Amino acid sequence: MLDKHDLQKCIHCGLCLQACPTYVATGQEAESPRGRIYLMRQALEGRIEWAQARPHIDACMGCLGCQTACPSGVPYAKLIEAARAEVETHARTPLQRFVRKQALRSFTNPARLRTMLKWGRAFGMRCAPRWMVRLLGANESAVQLPQLPPKSWRPSQTVYPAQGTPKAHVGLLLGCAQQVLFDRVHRATIGMLTLTGYEVHVPRDQGCCGALWIHNGYPQEARRNARQLLRAFREVDYVVVNAAGCGSTMKEYGLLFRGMPEQADADAFAQRVRDVHELLYAAELPEPKRADSLCITYHDACHLVHGQGIRQPPRALLQRLPGVKLIEMDGAEMCCGSAGIYNLLQPRLAREALQRKVRSIRDTGATLVASANPGCTLWIRQGLQEAGLPIEVLHPVEILAKAYGVMP
Ligand code: SF4
Ligand code: SF4
């Protein structure tokens, strides 16, 4: 629920404006964090209808660049999630809500997502179908259908033993898109964690973390997913996540259940969530087995850098590899425009953000981009391909697993 005290923390200083990709792209106050906070306040006080605020709330990437930049401690993540829930309830028709929920159900169910992509490809579709994006309220289809890996992957074991005496038991979140499209990232994660002394558990009944639901204004559905994870990961010391958006949401489960009977459980769960880079950065790593000469630039996934405050660990882990040259790009912390399903819903602004990102990558001269979120990886790959740049995009853990010789 929108909290007026959170809204009042904004002192209108404007220090967040240049960190906001939609403000940078449009120059409009209503597309800035400050403008959106003002609109939320107006709507909360009944001075305007939520329908008037809706286009500007919808155009927000939810990247949280503003939250990092804000000196006044405005909890923007909390505000935009609550504002989106208000928009869904008060400023959409039942048909719009139905369509949006169906889309979210498909994206957050690995079996459905796999089938959709398989059939889409079988029918020769290159992009998300126009009728679908129209139904979702967008006017063009900007997102290419990703290629499914040749074989669908399921973990062969539920427990992967540590090399040596286990120092902790960790549970691996499989997620939705990550599981369907990036099984290599999971295999690399298991390889790196077992190498560093963690016993990795992969509970069968996990499901989605709820991030897409909460980011699109459906907290009830997010809670339903979260409850399943609370049960599935009860026995492990840490819950390890390799997708930035999921990890950021799971670290906020306490907020999702505020004032509810599950709050204590959710708080305790959130305390145990770790991004994979956090665990690997704190671990003692052996000497890498390979020293490939690589020129890498690192893209900060918004929900890793702004949502979880993780900047240094992925960079430091990559820099430990002999042969790696890490070159910083301009605007590494600026959103690429993928932002969950934002690129489906807001193609124009998403494309502008992608083009900025592609230019920054190109200017580094790097031949490899490291990106720790599946949505960013797909979107940046698409942008690089469209620009004719032969640059690969991989998760940092894939690069590490290859260097340490644990990529199965
Ligand atoms: S979350 Fe990102 S797009 Fe939205 S207001 Fe903040 S900086 Fe701008
Ligand atoms: S930096 Fe913070 S306080 Fe200043 S305008 Fe932006 S949100 Fe408001």
Image: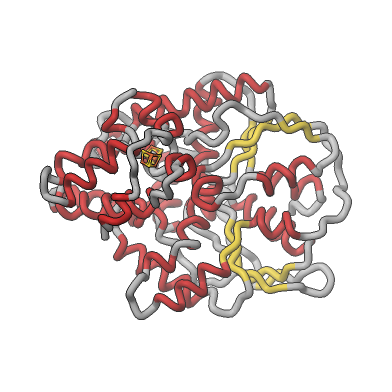
From the viewer's perspective, tell me whether residue 13 is left or right of residue 328. left
Q: Is residue 70 above or below residue 218?
A: above
Q: Is residue 1 above or below residue 393?
A: below
Locate residue 364, reporting x and y percent.
Answer: 66, 22
Q: Is residue 122 above or below residue 21?
A: below
Pick the front one: 67 or 80? 67
For the N terminus, the image quarter is bottom left
- Which residue is found at the position 50% from the left and 30% from the top? 382
- On the image, which quarter does residue 53 sit in? top left
Locate residue 342, reporting x and y percent.
Answer: 37, 40
- Which residue is found at the position 50% from the left and 62% from the top? 251
Pick the front one: 108 or 225? 225
Is residue 186 something that shows in the picture?
A: yes
From the viewer's perspective, tell me whether residue 390 is left or right of residue 18. right
Pick the front one: 134 or 9? 9
- Which residue is found at the position 12% from the left and 43% from the top? 48
From the viewer's perspective, tell me whether residue 125 is left or right of residue 5. right
Q: Is residue 75 above or below residue 120?
A: below
Quadrant assignment for ligand 2: top left
- Which residue is found at the position 47% from the left and 28% from the top? 354
Locate residue 122, reporting x and y percent.
Answer: 42, 40
From the viewer's perspective, tell me whether residue 407 is left or right of residue 348. right
For the C terminus, the image quarter is bottom right
